Image (cartoon, rainbow, N blue to C red):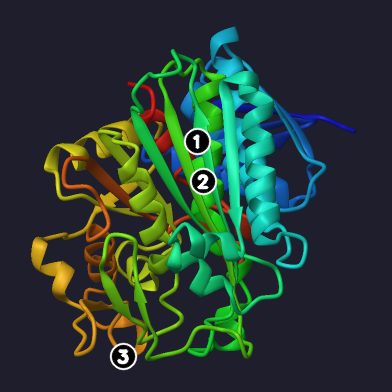
Amino acid sequence: MDIMTVTLTNDAPAAHWGKADVTYQGAQTLIHLSGSDELRQVQMAARKIRNQGVNAVQLTGDLWNLHSQWAFAQGFATAKAGYQVLWCGSDADQATLTQRAEAAQFARKLINDTPEDLSPVGLATQAAAWIKNIGGDKVSFTIVEGQELLEKKWVGIHAVGRGSERPPALLELDFNPLAADAPVSVALVGKGITFDSGGYSLKSSEGMLAMKCDMGGAATVTAALGLAMKAGLNKRVKLFLCCAENLVSGRAFKLGDILTYKNGTTVEIVNTDAEGRLVLADGLQAASDTGAPLIIDAATLTGAAVMAVGSNYNAIFSPQTATLQLAQKRAAAVSENVWPLPLDPWHKDMCPSAYADTANSRPVKGGGAGGASNAAGFLWRFVSPQANWLHVDLAGAFESSASALWAAGATTHGVLTIAELLKD
């Protein structure tokens, strides 16, 4: 494989290149920094280089740092394998970048896998195997699937997944590098809808095409945990992945059904395409049962979050201002983008039902105004009041088509933020 060298420079391009920010001198490629939003510029330059058919690069020169090299790698990555970025700089930076690349590649492959190749149980199994490979005997797990979910009162995951021939599943994983009775410091919850047809609230073909990405939350929290473990995580963390296929069949859940959750909350189904919050409700209850002082969930949950913050940010929600501020600080430390959206106690009541404690949405397209906050308010009903809670709506986890910053497919945006939140 031919390897092209790529160097950052503060010099303007030669006059004959005009305003180009990427120029070529023989086998060497130069990225000309303009001094404004340099990480974005580097990522866009990586896309341009990759689009020239370049598959392997060696980053060289003194201007590269941890953040710019990672921005380049994110722009250079594609859904198709067979590309390579060779790092430069200190041994510590190169080790960190390698760990990030391994975690991102795990998440990217899972998210980009076809729905046929990734069943709910398959998702749970692959996630558990990857974490087990990193943590060895410090990792234990169980996978609850099919009818056993009802026996354990995980009614949301079961209802959403019962329309498929492939059973739904809940992964319960424990990473414990401490004593057997050590307290759980953080509980992670991920939405793992391996394909979302919308159920009887059927999506359009265009809206359904990218729905293999609807397990992006599960991939993100798993990759974040693995990355933190690779970096030496020394606290007990539990991981819950809520996995199902949302399909149409004679066994599928229907509009007008009422679910009674483990904590006694009753939920009327008014939109089967608002299924992510139904499975996360189980995961958040399981996370709350651990007594963890911090619960973090991640999900490709609402189109409303994309409308609010675009696809280059992830939306964050929390009842605790300090938790939001911590998430913003940790995201900034790894050059990822998050933006807080409103969450007030009255958001819990924004999906009223005449028949149950709440509905799972509002019976209007997209859940109506404030849909992302209303979804977060629904989830809040299932979180322990003793825990700090961060909900991440992954607006930036997937690109349906290539852009100036990203190739089509998984971006893994959010993995680094959650890994940073696990550190202390």
* Residue 225 position in % (x across, y down): 50, 33
Residue 403 visible in this rendered orientation of the protein: no
Nearer to me, 226 or 315: 226
* Residue occupying the point 69% across, 49% down: 109
Q: Residue furthest front?
A: 151
In the image, what residue type sits under mark 3? Answer: Val
For label 2, the residue is 220
For label 3, the residue is 364
Distance Cα–Cα, label 3 vs label 2: 29 Å
* Residue 15 position in % (x across, y down): 58, 41
For label 1, the residue is 224
Nearer to me, 7 or 380: 380
Distance Cα–Cα, label 2 vs label 1: 6 Å
* Residue 159 position in % (x across, y down): 50, 74
* Residue 357 drawn above or below residue 395: below
Q: Local crowd at mark 1 within 10 Å, few (<14), some, or many (≥20)?
A: many
Q: Which badge, 3 or 2, is on the more N-terminal residue? A: 2
In the image, what residue type sits under mark 1? Answer: Ala
In the image, what residue type sits under mark 2? Answer: Thr
* Residue 341 position in % (x across, y down): 21, 58
Where is residue 345, by image quadrant? bottom left
Q: Quadrant of the N terminus?
A: top right
Q: Look at the numbered discs 2 and 1 and tell me whether their residues touch, using CB distance below 8 Å.
A: yes
Disc 3 element: loop
Residue 288 visible in this rendered orientation of the protein: yes
Q: Residue furthest top?
A: 91
Q: Residue furthest right?
A: 1
* Residue occupying the point 54% across, 40% down: 222
- In the image, taking residue 191 as reference, residue 13 lies left or right, namely right
Q: Look at the numbered discs 3 and 1 and tell me whether their residues touch, using CB distance below 8 Å.
A: no
